[in-house]
Amino acid sequence: MEGKKMKKRCVIVGGADINDYDYIRNKLHDDDYVIYCDSGLKHLNELGVQPDLIVGDFDSHENPGLDSETIVLPREKDDTDTVFGVKEGVRRGFDDFLLIGVIGARLDHTLGNVSILLYLDSLKKKGCIIDDYSEIEIISDKTAYITDDCTFFSLLNITGCARGITVTGAKYPLYDAEISCEYQYGISNEVIPGKTAAVSVKEGKLLLVRIRKQGA
């Protein structure tokens, strides 16, 4: 990207199914730097956004041979194509990441992709996953806010033990609470109508899942 204006956000496109393309397209910005990861290329036509970079070993999608910069990866490697794409975005200097097409039928890939949010948070970078139903991010050292247009929100602990949790503006408030990986009681909370809920944690990290609509 030498000689060009640095784009503001890195968008990672994975190969999990997307059904509500209109919703996803509305979350994209004209100045996004978009990385398609292998089978994420199946979303190219529906998203209508050309890749700035393509990465993959092309075991699940053929190399389209586009003019876009392409990094061909070996099939035997530690990083998935999606993880490599994120690391490449980090290497290129991005601090804000949006991941789409990374939550799907493969639970192993889904959990691995959710852990990318922990990786980005450890680097003090912003990361968010969106799918057809939800928006997912990590809460650590900054307060998160949830507006009342969110159907439900859940707080999950996916690493260690989170302490000093405070939730206000919600149906089920918390004050200096603790959530461990072994007891996930922070599921399906609701914002009080007309209010904005606030969530903070003094120690550890929480996974915040905003549910905008429920599945069938």
Image: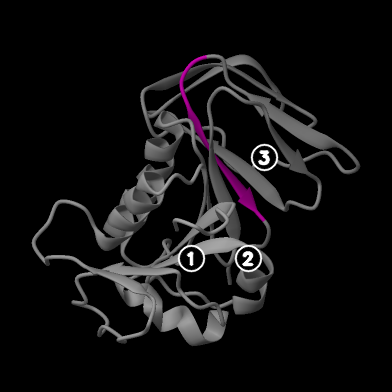
- CB under 8 Å between callouts 2 and 1? yes
**In the displayed structure image, the side of residue 103 where residue 185 appears, left or right:** right
Indicate whether residue 107 is drawn in magenta: no
Query: Which x, y percent locates residue 38?
Result: 30, 73
Q: Name the quarter where the N terminus is drawn.
A: bottom left
**In the displayed structure image, the side of residue 164 where residue 52 appears, left or right:** left
- CB under 8 Å between callouts 2 and 3? no
Disc 2 to disc 1, C-alpha distance:
10 Å
Q: Answer above or below: position of 64 versus 9.
A: below
The residue lying toward the viewer, choosing from 76 and 104, is 76
Mark 2 Cα-neighbour bin, 10 Å: few <14, some 14–19, many ≥20: some
Give the prevailing secondary structure in the magenta stretch: strand
Image mark for residue 34? 1
Disc 3 to disc 1, C-alpha distance:
33 Å
Q: Callout 3: helix, strand or loop?
A: loop
Disc 2 to disc 3, C-alpha distance:
28 Å
Image mark for residue 28? 2
Q: Callout 2: helix, strand or loop?
A: loop
| Residue type for callout 3 | Asn
Q: Answer above or below: position of 38 versus 107.
A: below
Viewer-side label of 2, 1: 1
Mark closer to the chain start, 2 or 1: 2
Q: Is residue 171 visible?
A: no
Question: What residue range appears in magenta?
Answer: 203-211
Q: Answer above or below: position of 181 versus 64.
A: above
Q: Answer above or below: position of 90 versus 59.
A: above
Mark 1 Cα-neighbour bin, 10 Å: few <14, some 14–19, many ≥20: many
Q: Residue visible at 91% across and 42% down? A: 194
Residue of label 3:
189
**In the displayed structure image, the side of residue 101 where residue 30 appears, left or right:** right
Query: Which x, y percent locates residue 54?
Result: 35, 71
